[in-house]
Amino acid sequence: MRDYDANNKLMQIEPRNPIYLGQKLELCSGAKDIEITVERIVDEKGKEMEQIHGGLHTCWIPYDEAPAEFSILREQINEFDPSSVELSMESIES
């Protein structure tokens, strides 16, 4: 997160990976993680976009309040549940 526009309720981000409409992201502030869905992407010139690729540029996405200092956005990753894994020795024994 680079900046926040309180008048338009947009946070400026510098993506390192592609971001697209409908994508679920986590805003990590240290105190808590907040799930957000990308509803809008606006480039540096004010043009609305469906997706933006990572690189050396910024864009704006909606957020209702100024994020905490040093907050980062990351792609939401499903938690791993080890109890859902079934182990088998079948291929080792063959």
Image (tube, helix red, strand yellow):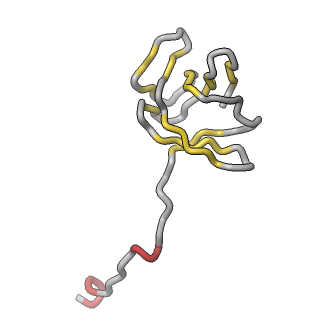
Is residue 36 depicted above or below 66 in this figure? below
Question: Picture coordinates of residue 90 (x, y %)?
Answer: 26, 86
Q: Quadrant of the N terminus?
A: top right
Task: Give the residue displayed 42% in from the left and 31% down from the top.
Answer: 20
Left or right: 71 as drawn, with respect to 82: right
Q: Residue furthest bottom?
A: 93
Task: Give the residue displayed 70% in from the left and 34% down from the top.
Answer: 67
Task: Give the residue displayed 45% in from the left and 33% down from the top.
Answer: 18
Left or right: 60 as drawn, with respect to 49: right
Is residue 40 depicted above or below 71 in this figure? above
Q: Residue furthest top?
A: 45
Question: Picture coordinates of residue 36 (x, y %)?
Answer: 54, 39
Is residue 8 depicted above or below 67 in this figure? above
Kindly indicate the quadrant of the structure image that contains residue 29: top right
Q: Quadrant of the C terminus?
A: bottom left
Is residue 82 depicted above or below 65 in this figure? below
Question: Picture coordinates of residue 53 (x, y %)?
Answer: 45, 28
Q: Residue furthest left?
A: 94
Kindly indicate the quadrant of the structure image that contains residue 64: top right
Left or right: 47 as drawn, with respect to 90: right
Camera-nearest residue between 54 and 70: 70
